[in-house]
Image (spheres, grey):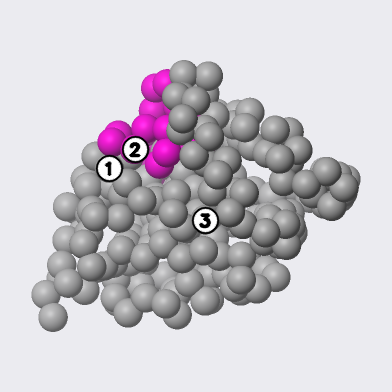
């Protein structure tokens, strides 16, 4: 088997979306790109990482994650460092400080007011004001195609994750950090800190973009991923 055919792309989605958020990047490595929807995979980030790894046959992976998907990508790398050729972390905060009040507020809002209300409060504000309304509406439609149980599961996993900042800083795996210039969660400063702390870290700040780079600036993310694939293929 050639090195190219042995390399896979594993895409891990953000809240409150699913694997379809990567539709514009799936053909970068045709036949070797995987974008599972994570909510059914279990109650912890480790569960998600284990089952995501079990889905892919390629022995070398570039793992791409956005937000909680980036946290899951770090979990994958910790579980199987010999298989992970590179990480691409988008809008990812590897250090976690528990916020049980915020978690419980989100649970209550989902249960009492539904997904529309949670979208307006938590996720719509993460898009850049420069992003087309149609892009934001398409993302909202993805969330609305999911169940309240799915989103609640994602919130639970997000708030129960372990800190992986030490692993990210000590790992020999190359880490490409991507953030929108208008991202507020975690923001440019946190992304720069992650890239600087990594042994082999690089930072890309995408203009006119918020948290969801794959949707807001899909072509720019394609260019970044294509460069990473070219290095490792």
Marks 1 and 3, the one that precedes in the sequence: 3
Dot 2 lies on which element? helix
- Residue 218 on image: x %, y %: 34, 38
Q: As drawn, is 37 to the left or to the right of 160?
A: left
Mark 1 and mark 3: Cα distance apart in space: 18 Å
Dot 3 lies on which element? loop
Is the residue under label 2 in contact with that under label 1 (CB below 8 Å)? yes
The numbered dot on residue 46 is none
Q: As drawn, is 1 to the left or to the right of 57?
A: left
Tag 3 residue: 18
Q: Nearer the viewer, mark 1 or mark 3?
A: 3
Residue occupying the point 39% across, 51% down: 22
Marks 3 and 2, the one that precedes in the sequence: 3
The answer, for residue 206, to whether it is visible in the render is yes
Residue occupying the point 52% across, 41% down: 139
Mark 1 and mark 2: Cα distance apart in space: 6 Å
Is the residue under label 3 in contact with that under label 1 (CB below 8 Å)? no
- The quarter holding residue 72 reads bottom right
Tag 2 residue: 218
The magenta-colored residue range is 201-220
Mark 3 and mark 2: Cα distance apart in space: 16 Å
Give 172 or 53, whichever is nearer the viewer: 53
Crowding at mark 3 (Cα within 10 Å: few <14, some 14-19, many 20+): many
């Amino acid at each position: 088997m050639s090195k190219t055919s042995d390399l896979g792309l594993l895409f891990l989605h953000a809240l409150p979306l699913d694997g379809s958020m990567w539709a514009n990047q799936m053909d970068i490595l045709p036949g070797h790109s995987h974008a599972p929807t994570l909510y059914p995979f279990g109650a912890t980030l480790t569960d998600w990482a284990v089952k995501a790894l079990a889905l892919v046959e390629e022995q070398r992976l570039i793992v791409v994650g956005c937000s909680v998907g980036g946290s899951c990508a770090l979990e994958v790398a910790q579980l199987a460092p010999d298989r992970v050729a590179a990480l691409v972390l988008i809008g990812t905060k590897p250090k976690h400080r528990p916020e049980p009040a915020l978690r419980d507020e989100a649970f209550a809002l989902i249960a009492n007011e539904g997904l529309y209300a949670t979208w307006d409060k938590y996720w719509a504000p993460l898009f850049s004001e420069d992003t087309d309304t149609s892009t934001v509406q398409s993302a909202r439609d993805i969330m609305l195609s999911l169940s309240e149980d799915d989103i609640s599961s994602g919130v639970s996993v997000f708030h129960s994750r372990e800190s992986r900042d030490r692993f990210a800083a000590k790992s020999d795996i190359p880490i490409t950090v991507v953030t929108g210039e208008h991202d507020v969660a975690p923001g440019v400063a946190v992304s720069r800190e992650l890239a600087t702390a990594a042994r082999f870290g690089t930072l890309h700040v995408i203009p006119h973009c918020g948290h969801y780079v794959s949707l807001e600036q899909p072509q720019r993310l394609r260019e970044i991923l294509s460069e990473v694939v070219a290095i490792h293929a």
